[in-house]
Image: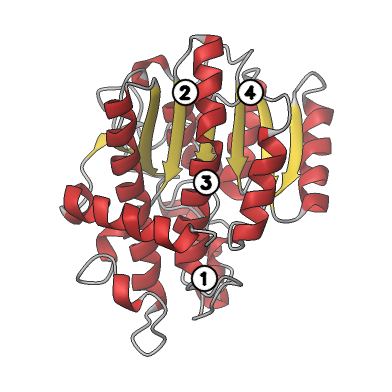
Amino acid sequence: MWMFGCRGPSGFSATSTAEQVTEGIDGNGLTAIVTGASNGLGLETTRVLALRGVHVVMAVRNVDSGMSVKNKMLEEMPSAKIDVMKLDLSSMASVRKFAADYNSSSLRLNILINNAGIMAAPFTLSEDNIELQFATNHVGHFLLTNLLLETMKKTVHECKREGRIVIVSSKAHRFAYKEGICFDKINDESGYNSYLAYGQSKLANILHAKELSRRLKEEEVEITVNSLHPGTIVTNILRYHGYFNAVAGAVGKFFLKNVQQGAATQCYVALHPQVKGVSGEYFMDSNKAKPSSLATDSELARKLWEFSLSLTDPK
């Protein structure tokens, strides 16, 4: 249990759960995509959104695992609307296939929750030759969001209801490399630090949200984009560090958030009426928060946008 939480302006705190922050909210008629939906925060987010009536599409690497989660949820919520689709964010080919399949379906898209991520992985290049944490946590989500954006705009027009893009970052964005984003050294193994690289990818998440929000405001499109820190939670994101995972699992229940509390902020930002019209912000404990100075650097955000476009250009 998180022992030092106090209620913020929203009326919620670090101890609030995803069910509590969405209590009384009717999500019927809404469709959401949740990446990394078969475990941890993604699973709980999927469950709570479905509980509130949202049609949830689970975007997962392992479809068998996703189907197992779906079936268990349907046992508890027989009327829930849940689909499972394959998505590997470390592969641009997989992202493109997912987006093409989704865009060609009859499904609308009101809410996109970019939740999936990996943490402190040993140096590895993705199949597209991009450092794996940056590829998975930022580049894959950047491409996915861009490819789904027209479907979201169409949904907003048809439903006359605000669309929401929610990007899960981390307080670890404060512990990136000194320059923030190492544009010229993304794939430099010699200078690689797994924790700083994780912080870099999480900084990129916030900058992505800021720049996309700015662009959508310029277009006068009714889609909000916000980022967030879910809190410190024990999930399988620590799978690359067995010792720390074991220690966190043993003592975490006394000092860290549980998954129900950890999923609260993304469910709050995705569904709560208090967040209507709010865009380009950073949230923590279901309240607005202040990110690092690098995360508010508009020039860095624009540079990252152009860099990300160059990485995802099919050429």
Is tag 4's residue or tag 1's residue first in the polypeptide sequence?
4
Amino acid carrying label 2: it is: Gly
Residue 183 percent coordinates (x, y): 30, 70
Q: Which mark is residue 132?
A: 1
Instruction: Please report whichever mark, 3 or 1, sits nearer to the chain's N-terminal start.
Output: 3
Q: In which quarter of the image is residue 223?
A: top left
Q: Do the residues labelled 4 and 2 touch (CB within 8 Å)?
A: no
Residue 77: assigned label = none
Q: State whether residue 120 is above or below residue 236.
A: below
Which image quarter holds the N terminus? top left
Along the horizontal axis of the image, is 159 left or right of 232?
right
Q: Is mark 2 on a helix, strand or loop?
A: strand
- The tag on residue 115 is 3
- Residue at the spot of label 2: 163
How far, Cα to Cα, is label 4 from label 1?
30 Å
Q: Name the residue under label 4.
A: 108
Query: Looking at the image, is mark 3 or mark 4 earlier in the sequence?
Result: 4
Cα gap from disc 4 to disc 2, whole angstroms: 11 Å
Residue ID at (59%, 68%): 239
Task: State the SS at label 3.
Answer: loop
Crowd band around label 3 with a 10 angstrom C-alpha radius: few (<14), some (14–19), many (20+): many
Q: Distance between the residues labelled 3 and 1?
A: 16 Å
Question: Mark 4 or mark 1, which is nearer to you?
Answer: 4
Is any atom of residue 114 visible in this view? no
- Asked if 97 appears above or below 12 in the picture, the reply is below
Between 255 and 16, which is closer to the camera in this rendering? 16
- How far apart are the two marked residues, 2 and 1, measured between alpha carbons? 29 Å
Q: Which residue is nearer to you in this view: 251 or 298?
A: 298
Q: Position of residue 215 (x, y in %)?
A: 31, 35
State left or right for residue 40 relative to residue 232: right
